[in-house]
Amino acid sequence: MPAKKPHISVIIPTLNEEGNIRRVIKRVDGALDGDSYEILVVDGYSDDRTAQIALSLGARVIYDRKGKGSALIKGFRSARGDILVSIDADLSNEPKEMRLLIDSIEIGYDICMGSRFITGGGTQDMPLIRRIGNRFFVMLVNLFFHAHYSDLCYGYRSFRKDKIGKLGLKESRFAIETEISIMAAKKHLKVIEIPSVEKRRDSGEAKLRTFSDGWSILRTILANLQR
């Protein structure tokens, strides 16, 4: 008897992504054709029709107003799948890469992280100041937490559902990926990086604020030295 295929939850945090959400969901549907899956949109009470469009396309929609980190944590807790995938709503992540994220969990890893800075990866949307900042934060995390990451502030990732609770995540805003990486190292989870190509945002306004979010990432790194 063949093994039962795992159920997959694709978690998409959104805030005013009316111009992108339809194409994101349709591309996820295409990438997971034949799989057992759900699409879970965690919306930050958008002013536009993001939530309505997601619902019309069969996604499950829940709400969270605190920030990206809080939205992801709520999505992790609400997800029904055995394997969880986080993907951005701005069309910067390629759903065709999702199969490798899922396969990595199926073969035994606890977390699989997309990386823009290993062979096969890349980015079309990282100014020099952000590239320098990301490299600096990667260096700090690797030094302080004895990790071997090549990328840090990138949200295209997959997770084994039964390992998420072990991370004790608290970060409510954009430093959530940093916190996940740190806690995965501290808890000695099995982590793998795969190459991922980040594209430019297709429509709408970017939510990332280079300096304020950079300070938040640094604060998260320093705070976790005491946890």
Image (cartoon, grey):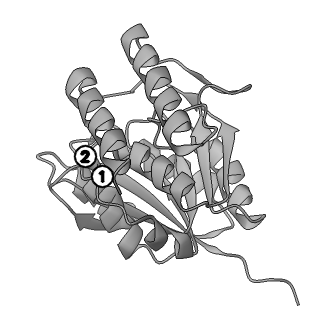
- Amino acid type of disc 2? Arg
Residue 188 showing in the rendered view: yes
Secondary element type, mark 2: loop
From the viewer's perspective, is residue 87 above or below residue 125? below
Q: Quadrant of the N terminus?
A: bottom right
Residue 217 tag number: none
Q: Which residue is mark 1?
A: 69
Q: Residue furthest left?
A: 47
- Residue 21: x percent and y percent? 36, 46
Q: Which mark is residue 173?
A: 2
Q: Decide: marks 1, 2 in contact (CB < 8 A)?
A: yes
Picture quarter containing residue 108?
bottom right
Crowding around mark 1 (Cα neighbors within 10 Å: few <14, some 14 to 19, many 20+) is many
Q: Nearer the viewer, residue 3 or 115?
A: 115
* Residue 82 percent coordinates (x, y): 58, 75
**Chain-order first, disc 1 or disc 2:** 1
